[in-house]
Image: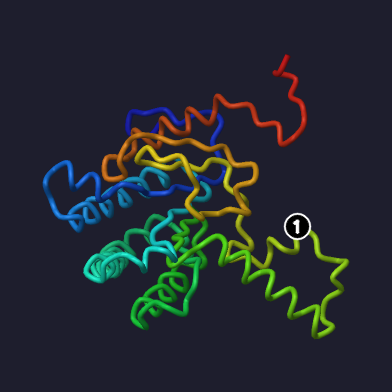
Amino acid sequence: MVRGTETPAVLPRHVAIIMDRNGMWAKKRLLPREAGHVAGVSAVREVVRAATDFRLQYLTLFAFSSENWKRPRTEVNALMGLFRGYFRSDLNELHERNVRVRIIGSRDRVARDILEMNEEAEHRTVNNTGLNLTFAFDYGGQEEIANAARELARAAKEGRLDPETITPELFASRLFTGGLPEPDLLIRTGGEHRLSNFLLWQSSYAELLFVDTLWPDFGRKELLAAMENFAQRVRQFGGISDKVA
């Protein structure tokens, strides 16, 4: 039992979330978009705490996409400030909760202090054995796949790799998510029904759940409901289940 709520008997091993509609949340309250992002950080905090209580193994959050650089500079700066603030205020708690932190995405475009902060979070929590918490930051699925293909092509050109030995497993190991299991459940908040360049390769057999709840309103109860939804699904992975007539 977790704070009066029962954890579903069938838990996804890996939950990934597209955290969407902070701006819409703020607009409905006649607030600036930045206020929605502040509320979104509070939702991150609650969901991560719930994930540790539910004993999830892996949680991946889409924090900042490679396309988000196109947003107004003031909004980008605000998002970067919130990312800095989250790790400054929450890293101790994450460590105490035995959470292992990992950051995936490009490391060429972010500010030096954020890069150092990311590396510190990863280094400090590397030996933790609880929830594996991954932030997709400056991340794009197509860019990730192109990078992996480029790395394998370079290895083949230099004679370090026989192209005939390339398998889906080998290719996956070259992605930013190498070493992580593929997501079992991918949730998108805010009512949109698309992946928006998130974990394109990894989500080939993920159960997709699109909910209308705006991200700042998504918390423990909503995460529990999503996992209960997952527990009711029949996963066949291209085969035929005995439960299907």
- Secondary structure under tag 1 reads helix
- The residue at 63%/68% (across/down) is 146
Which residue of the protein is positioned furthest toward the left in this rendering? 30
Q: Quadrant of the N terminus?
A: top left
Q: Position of residue 88 (x, y in %)?
A: 28, 69
Question: Relative to residue 178, is residue 112 depicted above or below?
Answer: below
Is 130 in front, or is 20? 20
Disc 1: CA contacts within 10 A as few (<14), some (14-19) or many (>=20): few
Q: Position of residue 183 (x, y in %)?
A: 57, 47
- The residue at 82%/81% (across/down) is 160
- The residue at 49%/61% (across/down) is 128
Question: Relative to residue 133, is residue 242 depicted above or below?
Answer: above
Left or right, residue 149 beside residue 191? right
Q: Name the residue beneath numbered marker 1.
A: 168
Q: Position of residue 139 (x, y in %)?
A: 48, 64
Q: Position of residue 44 (x, y in %)?
A: 33, 51
- The residue at 75%/75% (across/down) is 153
Left or right, residue 98 beside residue 84? right
